[in-house]
Structures are given as C-alpha cells and as structure tokens.
Image (cartoon, rainbow, N blue to C red):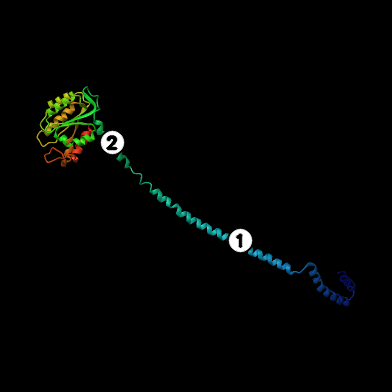
Amino acid sequence: MPPLSAEIDQWAPDGGLGRRRYRHPLVVAGVLFPLLTFAACGSSRPVAAKAGRTENTVATSPTKLTPPATTATTSAPTIVPTTAPKTAPPTTTLKAAPPPVATTTPTTVHPPATTATPTTALPALAPPAAGLVAGHVTAVGDSVMLDYQADLQADVPGIDVEAAVSRQWAEGEDALQQLRAEGRLGAVVIVALGTNGPITDADFNAMMSILAGASRVVFVNIVVDKPWQDPNNEVLSDGVARYSNTVIADWRTLESQHPGWIYSDGTHLPIGGPGAQALAALVASEV
C-alpha cells in the first residue's frame, strides 16, 4: 500500500501524462484493493448468508407462536357449553322433594288411641275376700258355655269351667255356693246363665251376695230365641250398673253382627267354630 501512494505523489504534479499514468495504477489498485480487502476481511457472502439465516429465523418464529394462540381460543368455548347443561339437572331434583311432605301421618296416629280406650273401662281388681282363691278364675254356665269351653280354656289358662246342660239361674247359685264353701272359688268369676228361663233383679242380687268380696264378676248376656232374651239382658245390664266390681261381656251385640255363627235354634254354636272362638275371646277380654 505505501508504494501506490508514492506513485500517486510523484505523478500527480505532471500534466496530462501524470493523469494517464495515475489512472492505470488506480485501476490496478481498484482491482487489487478489493482483493486485498477480501483477503483481509473475508468474503461478503457469508455475511449475507448469516443475514439471510437471521431473517429466516425471525420469519419462522411467528408461525411457532400462532399455534398456542389457536389452542387457547378453542378451549374457551368448550368449557362454557359443558357447564351450562350440568346446572340444569339440580333444578329437577329439587322439585321431587315436595311429594314426600304429606300430612297423612297425623291421621294414622289417632285411630290406635281410640282402640286402646276400652281396656281402661275395666275396673281395677280389688283384693279378694276370705274363701276366694286369688289369681284363679271360675266359670259357671249352661249348655252354651259347653260350646266354647275348649276355646275359653285356651284363652284363660288355668280356668275352672263348671257348665251343665239346661242349667237354671238358681242351680248356678248353688254350684257357686258349694265351690266357695270348699275353698275352690276363684277371685274372678264368670257367670253365663239365663238362657233357660227368666230372671229378676232379686236373682241378680242373690248371686252377688254369694260372690261378695270377689275381685271381679263377668256376666255374659244371652242369645236365645225365647221371649225372655231381652228382659234377662236388661236385668244383667241394670245389675252391673249397681255393682262396681262387675262387667258385661256383650255377646248379644257381637252375635247380631254375625248371624251365621250360631245354629238354627238361635242359641248354640258349633264347637270350635268361629262363633265359639269369638265368644271365648270376648269373655277372656273382660277377665
């Protein structure tokens, strides 16, 4: 490089010749100078290639960013429709709750209370007087009692049944008097008489004098196709009203609701039949 600048300094002061000679070395210098610069600085193509690569990386980088943006936009609409239908079903389940709330329970509670009241009507058992066996039950009756004797003994375990065919009221008094004298009369007595003839209030009082001091006396009213049926039942009902330790087993009312329970004679029952079982249960419920 210094020799070229020296030639320029020498030839520059001359006239037209210096210019011609100046141009020639300058052209050569113009050719050599780029070559020297290329050798010293390196080719310009790698720079351009590097620049091209940077441009390509810049150009491709936006395309890699766009896919995440599209996935974000698609996820948003899918969430909104799925949550909307899920909130609808709870409204239907809430409507199903009102039907169980029904005011039918109070109505079912009242009937049992009314059925329990008849048991409280029975008078309390008083301690028996001397000559009566406490905790023991004695039954005296006529032929109708023989029809339900087995069922009565099943319903009242240990009961002593003293029944006879065609027994009159007065004969029943004699049987009870003898049992008491023998010390075999129970503190609870069942009297089922009056089917075979009329009775009076005096007969009722005479019976109660024999049974004085009994804890309870159960009188069974009668069903018989005879004119004394209703008068005798009235005597029994009036007598029970006079004595606090007595009760009525209302066979007349129960049988009237089931006329098929008795035979055609209007009095007796088939042994072991539904009528005999019902009459035994009725009497046992009053003991």
Residue 51 picture location, percent across and down: 70, 66
Mark 2 is surrounded, within 10 Å at the Cα level, by few (under 14), some (14 to 19) or many (20 or more) other residues, namely few
Q: Answer with mark 1 or mark 2, whichever residue precedes in sequence.
A: 1
Q: Foreground: 190 or 228?
A: 190
The residue that disc 1 covers is 65
Q: Foreground: 29 or 253?
A: 253
Q: Which amino acid does label 1 sit on?
A: Leu
CB of mark 1 within 8 Å of CB of mark 2? Answer: no
Q: Foreground: 173 or 64?
A: 173
Q: In this view, does 18 lie above or below 80?
A: below
What residue is at 67 percent from the left and 65 percent from the top?
Answer: 55
The residue that disc 2 covers is 113
Residue 145's disc is none
Is 201 left, or right, of 44 in this rendering?
A: left
Q: Which quarter of the rendering shows the C terminus?
A: top left
Q: Which quarter of the rendering shows the N terminus?
A: bottom right
Residue 272 picture location, percent across and down: 19, 40
The quadrant in which residue 223 appears is: top left
Q: In this view, does 150 lie above or below 126?
A: below
Q: What element carries label 2?
A: helix
Is 67 left, or right, of 281 in this rendering?
A: right
Q: What residue type is labelled 2?
A: Ala
